[in-house]
Image (cartoon, coloured by chain):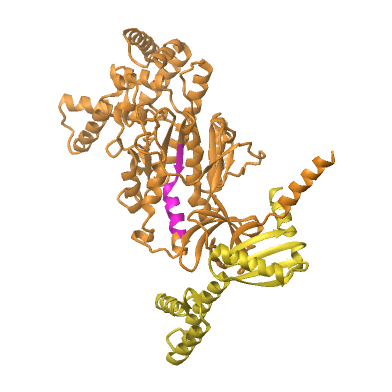
Amino acid sequence: MSTVVEQIEQQIAKLSSKAVKKNTGTIRAVADGVAKLDGLSDVMYNEMVQFPGGAIGIALNLEADEVGCVVLGDVSQLKEGDEVQTTGKLLSVPVGKALLGRVVDALGRPVDGKGPIDATESYPVEKIAPGIMVRKSVNQPLFTGIMAIDSMIPIGRGQRELIIGDRGTGKTTICIDTIINQARINKVGLASGDKAFRPVYSIYVAVGQKQSNVVRTINSLEAAGALEYTVIVAATAGDNPANQYLAPFSGASIGEWFMENGMDALIVYDDLSKHAVAYRQISLILKRPSGREAYPGDVFYLHSRLLERAARLDGKGSLTALPVIETQAGDVSAYIPTNVISITDGQIFLETDLFNQGIRPAVSVGLSVSRVGSSAQIKVTKQVGGKLKGELAQFRELAAFAQFGSDLDPKTKAQLDRGSRIVELFKQPQLNPLSIEMQAAVLWALQKSYFDSIEVKSVVAAANSFKEYLTSRKDALLTKIRTEAKLTDEIEAGLKASADEWKGTFAAK
Amino acid sequence: MRGDKKTKLLAKQLFKLSLVNGQVSPEQVAGVLAYVEKSAPRHSLALLKLYQQAIVTELAKSHALVEHAGPVSDATLHLIAGAMTKKYQRVVTASAKPNAKLLAGLRVRIGSDVYESTVAGQLATLSNAV
């Protein structure tokens, strides 16, 4: 017995006499969320440093005589001469399914008042993007639920598709609709018991946004039942620039966990314009040389290293990125928009004019593109919507010419009529994504001229009536379209019978 | 006070001149100070502050400040100096400074490295962990 006690005592003696080595420095100056430090001779780039009072910082500038560090937390308690120490760790955030349904800050700490997050793993915020060999081509669709996008600008799992447009053109709405659609698909897929079904988890990163907007987004997701499949990373306008700079990287780490563990995830960066502004602020305070529009020289690398982390991995999962960029007066040739356009695999351009004309979502067909193209579409969408983009582009061109005269040949008039019907059909209310089978059915009806005899102003009502008819009476047909994912003779016959029956009832009204 | 680029460069050059075999030489420092007094370069105050900072940082690398709560013998100081000289491969001197806040144990500071084996340090670690 006494031997055991002695052993424990020896162990305690060993521990208590063990000296701990720390590398320390002192604060030389603190201003605007950035601290200049003396000492810290062993500090590494991007290493976390510990300030007194629990605040942490990240070493971003390693110079001969000082270290520049952004402070994540309350700077009001810090003063000149305070001791700072290195931690030997890179900044990490908790990851895993425990974060689903939660709202966290840039450091992964819960801010929703729902208690601590039970996460067992953490990932570093800065991580090198997956290399070439581990990547797989993007050929699985990610349905946004927005007919204009799914049929003409398809997005694939692992793709980076930019959402770009002026303020108030519906950029965030498209992202929220996409998240809601993933939740709906997840619910249907998981309920079906299909073992091959791969749910898509979403991460919404709010950078520099008004807190009221973030609350609205959370409420929308909650009301649609999508929050349980979503993680929200919030670095609002009230947070310091360091947190705003870090939030997209934290979100990417959370998304990477799903990808690395064989799952699919979608991440929305809303928005990278404000992210660039936050980074510019930090860089200017750190006295880094400024370049075009006063952005630092590495602002391209800032976004490229972030967006390169979205990928589809061979034998694992995928991370799809929807970065958002806000333009000024529709100028897509500004510095940050052109940077992000060149990094991403396509863009969805939203036009203010279209929005004001009531065409919502205000997707500009001419300027929007998906570089992944039809390889990320299922067969049924290709069959019913393959020619839509061309038809719509032709319509826009003809509509511009038709303004100059009313004497049009029948072929041109037919093209204009059809185009205006397509435009009407693509109008979709917000927070109301459409399932892919419903989109296919509506587009099939359009292709088969079921809407041609209906007045243009009644097309939206007719489409809604058709959707309602299919939902209430032809659920089996819709399920068949979803499961088979192509137009078979049987499905086409079913659609024809349904459309004929609906047309009869609609015309009778 | 931060000097401009030229002042920083000059301070760096003066600092290099103050070293002999990688150690700060009092004679060289006296020479540098005499030169600054005589030539009165621009931003002398900023220059001298930068120079002072560089010298202080360099001297701190060769001096182990042993903070202690309780008695520390000369033999212990000698042992610490010897161990640090071996570790950093430069001549390190040691001096003692009593610090009752440590409660018990020793804290050795050399340059920006701190070796801590104190009760206060362990309590702080415990409080951070809780």
| Residue placed most toward the observer, A126 or A428 | A126
| Up-down relation of residue A99 to residue A478 (above or below) | below
| Residue placed most toward the observer, B128 or A324 | B128
Visible in this render: residue A328?
no
Query: Magenta region: which residues?
Result: A267-282
Tell whether position A268 is magenta.
yes
In the image, taking residue A166 as reference, residue B89 lies left or right, namely right
In the image, taking residue A291 as reference, residue B57 lies left or right, namely right
Secondary structure mainly formed by the magenta segment: helix
Q: What residue is at 48 percent from the left and 37 percent from the top?
A: A255
When asked about the image quadrant of residue A132, the answer is: top left
What percent of the width, then of the height, locates residue B6? 39, 78
Q: What residue is at 56 percent from the left and 29 percent from the top?
A: A225
Toward the right, the furthest residue is: A2
Toward the bottom, the furthest residue is: B38
What percent of the width, then of the height, locates residue A307? 40, 42
> Can you tell which chain is drawn yellow?
B
Quadrant where the C terminus of chain A lies? top left
Quadrant where the N terminus of chain A lies? top right
What percent of the width, then of the height, locates residue A190? 52, 20
| Residue placed most toward the observer, B62 or A65 | B62
All told, the count of numbered labels is: 0
| Up-down relation of residue A161 to residue A272 (above or below) | above
Chain A rendered in what hue? orange
